[in-house]
Image (cartoon, rainbow, N blue to C red):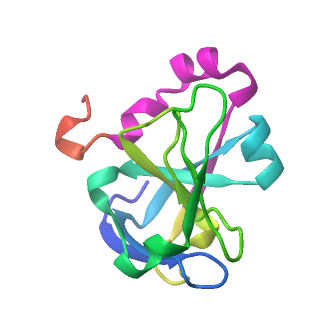
Amino acid sequence: MESEITVHSGGCHCKRVRWRVRAAKSVVAWQCNCSDCSMRGNTHFIVPSQEFELNEDSKQFLTTYTYGTHTAKHIFCKVCGITSFYIPRSNPDGIAVTYKCVDTGTLNHVEIKSFDGINWESSFDKMGISSCSKMVAEKPE
């Protein structure tokens, strides 16, 4: 997997929510089958929260939905309804970026992995997804 870091821009359908994220040009995106992700068809890659920057003007257009443990913060645009990013239960210290909401031209490759959100605890323990929100220096070798 290519590890060159670049700045990706993206946002929602109506473009009222815009952000920038520093991530590799090739990413691993997670397709989850939990009740929320499967209904939305969300497939996302996870970055440390320090690598994500929301445009200040976008905040007024956001709203948040939580359920269950209330750890995940499903953030979406109040105008068009698109979840272009959110705070995942698996990585509350990170940001999950919907890869299809990244502007074209900066992502070279997206590898899709499955996350069994229906059986969240066993999948979380098995998949190692929690390391995705750690800064490179923090990641175990």
Q: Report the residue that reaches farthest toward the front.
A: 60
Magenta stretch bounds: 110-133
Task: Provide the major secondary structure of the magenta segment.
Answer: helix
Residue found at the very far left of the displayed protein: 137
Residue 141 makes an appearance in the image: yes
Q: Give the residue at x 24% y 45%.
A: 135
In the rendered image, residue 58, in percent from the top left (x then y), is placed at 46, 76
User: Measured from the top left, where is residue 53 in percent x and y?
Assistant: 33, 67
Residue 98 seen in the figure: no
Q: Is residue 15 left or right of residue 139?
A: right
Which quadrant: the C terminus? Answer: top left
The quarter holding residue 9 reads bottom left
Residue 63 occupies quadrant: bottom right
- The image position of residue 54, as x and y in percent, is 38, 70
* 84 left or right of 134 in image: right
Query: In this rendering, would 30 be left or right of 140?
Result: right
Task: Name the residue furthest right.
Answer: 39
Q: Position of residue 69 (x, y in %)?
A: 58, 25
Compare residues 3 and 35 and report the one nearer the observer: 35
Q: Is residue 103 above or below residue 38?
A: below
Q: Residue at x 30, y 65 (%)?
A: 5
Answer above or below: position of 61 versus 70. Answer: below
- Magenta-colored stretch includes residue 117: yes
Look at 41% across and 81% down and name the residue there.
Answer: 57
How many marks the image carries: the answer is 0
Residue 118 vs 81, above or below: the answer is above
- Residue at image point 23% right, 45% down: 136
Quadrant in the picture for residue 101: bottom right
Q: Viewer-proximal residue, 66 or 94?
A: 66
Q: Is residue 21 magenta?
A: no
